[in-house]
Amino acid sequence: MSTELRNFLALSYDELEELNLNAKEQRLKRVPFHKIQEERLKYLADEKRIKAVTVLFSDLEGRLHMLDYDKKFLVKSYDNLTFDGSSIRGFTAQRESDLRLGIDWSAFYWAPADVFGSGKVLVFGDVIDKGGTPYTGDIRGMLKGYAEELHAKQGYTLNAANEIEGFLFQGSDAERRYHETGKFEYVNTGGYYHSLPGDPLRTFIDTTAEVQRAMGFQNEKDHPEVAPSQFEINYGYSEVVAAADHIQLYKLICRQVATRMGLTASFLPKPVVGVNGNGMHTNVSVSKNGKNLFWDPKGEENMSKFAWSFVDRILTHANDICLLLNASVNAYRRLDPHFEAPNQIKASAVDRGSMVRIPIGNEKSARVEVRSVGPDANPYMVMLSVFKSGLDGQTAKIKNLRQAERYLPDNIYTALENFRTADWTTTLLGEDVKGRYADLKQASADRCARLLGTFVKAPEVQYHHDVYNQYLWNQF
């Protein structure tokens, strides 16, 4: 279709980066909401080349949903954007289906036109109940409220950055066709740090990194990972809600770039048995008035008592929240110590089999790394459970808690039982949301082989929340 008559927004990558970094700075400085809203609405009204606004939100399992609103309609009706919540897994029942989307104007992104299409901008939305209050099933809203309350009452800023691993496979629909093919095909077998310039994996990594840079991610490094066709693209710290948003955008960018190359970016934790799986190491810290509260040059491993108390609470609640950090049947294949995966409920500066690691740091970078997280987990659920457990949880009276011989579950059924019976998860999520989340995980688990065995079963992929295909689900 001819585009010569269209006058749609398409900015250079340098222009995009400048716009996105300015928006990121506003978010970091906590510019008042009404000021950002006024600025964004004026921008949308004045910028004639923008035709649509893509509003993003996530369901209870962390699946990203997107709605395109005509720009002119959104500018006039941004305070009354309704949608049918009963069609979203884990949201409302059909009899009470009306929900609203509130626009989080601080979470506004300009995306490259050559990857996402011209004439559009992206913004994250808050899900609002019909009564006008934040919807309990919107974990992003729950995380946002928790972070804002901590900042208001104690001056805390919650910081996070994630190291997200993925695989690049042949074919543009490799996950949805797995029940037909029974296998994933690598595009590269080079391994850690190795790929030739211009090969499919390197081209994918380079392209994705360029898009991330343009969208204000502030990249740090990227490289092929240990397993064949595996990648990791690292970027800088953000405040906790922005960090979780970045996870969703990272996966969206990777999938979009891969699809345009005729390939599939997969974030299944263990899509191939016999090689390393995908992790999402979650690095966290807490600051106050610009000071990193985890740093103490005289403390054990240069970490403060505050930081070690945070670690002890995470270890105490490790089994309670395991289902939130490892959210699928397939995730429990990854928790295998033979492949550098962290299945031990321990804290260590050196042992990568420990659930929690204390990386080498300084006054700026001192942090706690939670290594047991799978990349298919709901990022808002991950951040909420890690920070709330670390700050508000209990500390178990276990001798030598940080090195006691304790292990994470090796299957989702044990994780489900721990999650359902734990008082802490009720405190964390509320009884209603906890029950709905557990029921969703149970439904997926019950459609898969109970014993994992030594090869990936088709239902693990077919009924995986990230790969959701309503047509396939309804054939069960």
Image (cartoon, rainbow, N blue to C red):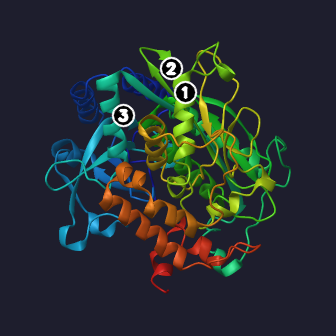
Does the CB distance between marks 2 and 1 fall below 8 Å? yes
Residue 268 appears in the rendering: yes
Which percent across, then down, holds residue 426? 36, 55
Asked which quadrant contains residue 119, the reply is: top left
Q: Which residue is the site of mark 3?
A: 147
The secondary structure type at the circle numbered 3 is helix
- At horizontal 65% and vertical 42% (from top left) the residue drawn is 207
Under mark 2, the amino acid is Leu
Does the CB distance between marks 2 and 3 fall below 8 Å? no
452 above or below 36? below
The secondary structure type at the circle numbered 2 is loop
Q: Which residue is the site of mark 2?
A: 293
- At horizontal 62% and vertical 68% (from top left) the residue drawn is 175
Under mark 1, the amino acid is Ala
Q: Which residue is the site of mark 1?
A: 307
Which percent across, then down, holds residue 70? 27, 50
Which percent across, then down, holds residue 459? 60, 77
User: Which residue lies most toward the left here?
Assistant: 131
Which comes before the other along the chain, label 2 or label 1? 2
Disc 1 packing (10 Å; few <14; some 14–19; many ≥20): many
Disc 3 packing (10 Å; few <14; some 14–19; many ≥20): many
**On the rendered structure, is 138 left or right of 80?**
right
**On the rendered structure, is 286 left or right of 357?**
left
Does the CB distance between marks 3 and 1 fall below 8 Å? no
The secondary structure type at the circle numbered 1 is helix
Quote the CA–CA distance across marks 2 and 3. Answer: 16 Å
Quote the CA–CA distance across marks 3 and 1. Answer: 18 Å
Which comes before the other along the chain, label 3 or label 1? 3
